[in-house]
Amino acid sequence: MYKKIVVAVDGSETAQQALVEAENIAKTYNAELCIVHAIVLTMGGDLEADKKVGQDIIDRAKSTVTIPNIKTQLLVSESGFGLIGITETIAAAVANWDADLVVVGTANRRGLKRFFIGSVAEQLITQVDASILLVRPAKT
């Protein structure tokens, strides 16, 4: 059913759970897996430092996966700032790689916090043509 799976990671526990789900699905369908992390250009920011942190997040995620031939991509948004830039960059990577499934963690925000902060997961729903699996945080 799935041949190419993209999982977006940001170093959070929920993203790690999403990675576990993506790996399980990739094993089940013998699919290719690509781990992505997106960063945005910020005014006054240190792009090289952001790239290093982003690559560390990808490397940690990749080290937990047991299937061979994992692809990774550090994505740098050139189209926008904040969540919009991250979302557009991930969506473009999904389209370019022709992924069948996107797996992403969701912070499970509610109320005003969700309204003001938004959600990469929520925005991806409107921007990709692949199926999307949202992984919620573990119940505590």
Image (cartoon, rainbow, N blue to C red):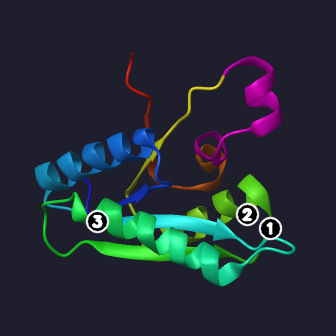
Q: Is residue 10 visible?
A: yes
Q: Choose between 15 and 134: the one closer to the eye.
A: 15
In front: label 3 or label 2: 3
Q: Which residues are magenta?
A: 110-123
Q: Is residue 116 magenta?
A: yes
Q: Which residue is mark 2?
A: 85
72 up-or-down from 2: above or below: below
Could you tell me the amino acid type at mark 2? Gly
Badge 2: how crowded within 10 Å, few (<14), some, or many (20+)? many
Could you tell me the amino acid type at mark 1? Gly
Judged left or right of residue 119, residue 21 is left
Q: Which residue is mark 3?
A: 62
* Residue 117 percent location from the top left of the image: 76, 38
Q: Which residue is mark 1?
A: 80
Judged left or right of residue 87, residue 68 is left
Q: Is residue 133 visible?
A: no
* Residue 33 percent location from the top left of the image: 28, 64
Query: In the rendered structure, are the residues bearing label 2 and label 1 in contact, judged by CB atoms less than 8 Å apart?
Result: yes
Classified by dominant secondary structure, the portion drawn in magenta counts as helix
Could you tell me the amino acid type at mark 3? Lys
Q: Choose between 27 and 46: the one closer to the eye.
A: 46
Q: Earlier in the sequence, mark 3 or mark 2?
A: 3
Instruction: Give me the C-alpha separation between circle 1 and circle 3.
Output: 27 Å
Element type at mark 2: helix
Q: Choose between 4 and 112: the one closer to the eye.
A: 112
Badge 1: how crowded within 10 Å, few (<14), some, or many (20+)? some
Residue at position x 43%, y 70% from top?
Answer: 56
Badge 3: how crowded within 10 Å, few (<14), some, or many (20+)? some
Instruction: Give me the C-alpha separation between circle 2 and circle 1.
Output: 4 Å
- On residue 114, which mark appears? none
Residue at position x 25%, y 72% from top?
Answer: 70
